[in-house]
């Protein structure tokens, strides 16, 4: 994957709202990303990653979800994969929440409402991180 290969990213989108999930999928399609897997909550995402982690380059998760929040998902994921890029979508980027997510190695935040351009900027960073990781390995 070249450093600018945002379109080659394989994304796991985790969102409990159908409307918000459709928005994410449409934005990813607009950016040129077609390999999108979905989960409706953190537990479903963890189950998917347990079976198919090698398929995913980045997790994009909503913060507030039933059964398991985005932060809980991040914490669980870091115990098994401290490296997988993780973008948190949140409408509440208050200081304490940001500090807690950063303490758990969140890769970046996407503050609601957001645009495809903002999402693409974050994914360009992820593509560079992944390209750098591949060179090291």
Image (cartoon, rainbow, N blue to C red):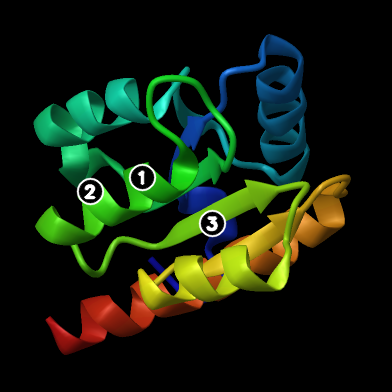
Residue for point 54% across, 75% down: 99
Q: Nearer the viewer, mark 2 or mark 3?
A: 2
Q: Is residue 127 visible?
A: no
Instruction: Report the side of 79 relative to 2 (left or right).
Output: left
Q: Is label 2 in contact with label 3 (beta carbons under 8 Å)?
A: no
Residue for point 64% across, 63% down: 109
Find residue 72 and name its label.
1
Residue that badge 2 annotates:
76
Instruction: Report the side of 19 relative to 58 (left or right).
Output: right
Q: Is label 2 in contact with label 1 (beta carbons under 8 Å)?
A: yes
Q: CA distance from mark 2 to mark 3?
A: 15 Å
Find residue 127 and name its label.
none
- Mark 1 secondary-structure assignment: helix
Q: CA distance from mark 1 to mark 3?
A: 13 Å
Q: Say above or below: 88 vs 124.
A: above
Instruction: Report the side of 16 relative to 19 (left or right).
Output: left
Residue 118 position, x and y percent, is 81, 60
**Quadrant including the C terminus:** bottom left
Q: Badge 2 local density, few (<14 within 10 Å), some, or many (20+)?
A: some
Residue 10 position, x and y percent, is 41, 43
Residue that badge 3 annotates:
87
Q: CA distance from mark 2 to mark 1?
A: 6 Å
- Mark 2 secondary-structure assignment: helix
Q: Nearer the viewer, residue 3 or 77?
A: 77
Residue for point 25% across, 40% down: 55
Q: Nearer the viewer, mark 1 or mark 3?
A: 1
Q: Badge 3 local density, few (<14 within 10 Å), some, or many (20+)?
A: many
**Quadrant including the N terminus:** bottom left
Residue 127 position, x and y percent, is 49, 68
Q: Say above or below: 10 vs 93.
A: above
Q: Nearer the viewer, residue 76 or 50?
A: 76
């Amino acid at each position: 994957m070249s450093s600018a290969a945002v379109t080659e990213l394989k994304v796991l989108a985790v969102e409990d709202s159908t409307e918000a999930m459709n928005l994410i999928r449409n934005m990813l399609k607009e950016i040129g990303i077609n390999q999108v897997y979905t989960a409706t909550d953190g537990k479903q995402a963890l189950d998917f990653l347990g079976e198919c982690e090698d398929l995913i380059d980045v997790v994009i998760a909503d913060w507030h979800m039933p059964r398991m929040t985005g932060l809980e998902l991040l914490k669980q994921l870091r115990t098994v994969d401290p490296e997988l890029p993780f973008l948190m979508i949140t409408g509440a980027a208050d200081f304490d929440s940001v500090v807690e997510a950063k303490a758990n190695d969140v890769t970046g935040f996407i503050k609601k409402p957001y645009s495809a351009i903002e999402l693409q900027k974050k994914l360009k960073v992820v593509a560079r991180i992944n390209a750098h990781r591949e060179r090291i390995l």
